[in-house]
Image (tube, rainbow, N blue to C red):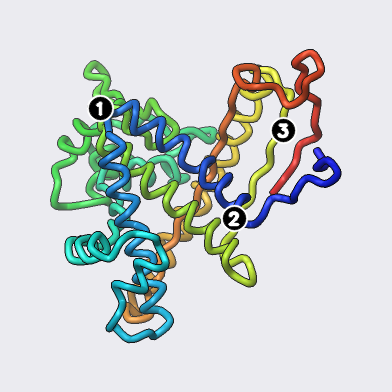
Amino acid sequence: MPSSAGSPQPSDHDALADAIQSVLAPLADLAVARGLTFATVEESLKQAFVRAAQEAQLAQGLPAHRLVSRISAATGINRREVTRLTQSDPGAPSPAGASLVSQLFTRWISDRKLRVKGKPRSLPRQGEAPSFEALARSITQDVHPRTLLDELCRLDLARWDAETDTVSLIQDGFTPRGDMQRMVEFLGDNVGDHLHAAVENVLGDEPAHFEQAVFAHGLSAESVEQVRQLARKHWKALVTEAVPLLEQRMDVDAQTPDAATQRVRLGLFTYHHDSAQTEPETGSAGVVPRRMPSGK
């Protein structure tokens, strides 16, 4: 709503503080749910602030002397803490590489030769292509296909039918529910890159990354499910087209390894929330106003 006459307009810092609250809220939910204390998260946040300030100082070509003082001034963290944190910094975590199981899963859902009517086909466990054994061998010669099959089944991604000796996928996305560590690695990598893209777009003169979304209020649970189905449909189509392209470009770029220094992450997500569980947007009988879909 428009601000009332005489009330101050929010500053850029106010808007940024609100945005940071929005980003931190789900992280706090995760930390509380998994027993990660505030002290642990605070240490990580201080480390990230010091690392960001240090990188900004060095990027400007400023001399190394008085670096601790400049970092302290930029972050508000006292110099003793800055010294401790710079000396103990292990460096920013690198994105986890794709596991063999995730590579196999992605190849299975994206290879048109392994699909029937748009869905991943069931494969005989052994034999010539198309078979699970041949698929596994196309990913790696170093790990036995049965080991990869056992891991797929453990993560509840595939099922082996012993009677027919066939293997079928039972998930349409690589979500290893049986592996908490892998799940939080995905969270850090996917959300981290998404946030990097959004931040660099905000800070840059021109958007450097594609980062868009549409949203709408006033939907029923049935309508939300239709949206989810739409996203699944387009994600399957995107994976089917993107994975062969990425594999092709990796093969081509491997011929000039000195120039092949870029990495890319391509994603799609949906999120829904019951707005009746939160404070309504208007004071009129608790009714949330209807809105046309909006994009940003």
* Other residues around mark 1 within 10 Å, as few (<14) / some (14–19) / many (≥20): some
Q: Name which residue lies at 18% across and 40% down.
A: 145
Residue 285 in the image: x percent, y percent?
79, 13
For disc 3, the marked residue is 216
Pick the front one: 218 or 242: 218
In the picture provided, is 225 more to the left or to the right than 107? Answer: right
| Residue 124, horizontal then vertical, whole percent | 29, 31
Residue at the spot 39% in from the left edge and 68% down from the top edge: 73
Q: Label 1 is placed on what type of residue?
A: Cys
Give neighbour class at mark 3: few <14, some 14-19, many 20+ (Cα, 10 Å): few
Q: Residue at x 45, y 55 (%)?
A: 265
* Cα separation between marks 1 and 3: 37 Å
Mark 2, Cα crowd under 10 Å, few <14 / some 14-19 / many 20+, is few
Whether residue 71 is situated above or below residue 292 in the rendered picture: below
Tag 1, which secondary structure? Answer: helix
Q: Position of residue 101 (x, y in %)?
A: 27, 42
Element type at marker 3? loop
Amino acid on which the number 3 mark rests in the picture: Ala
* 205 and 95: which is toward the camera: 205
Q: Which mark is residue 13?
A: 2
Say which residue appears at 43% left-offset and 40% top-offset: 109
Horizontally, is 81 left or right of 252 in the view? left
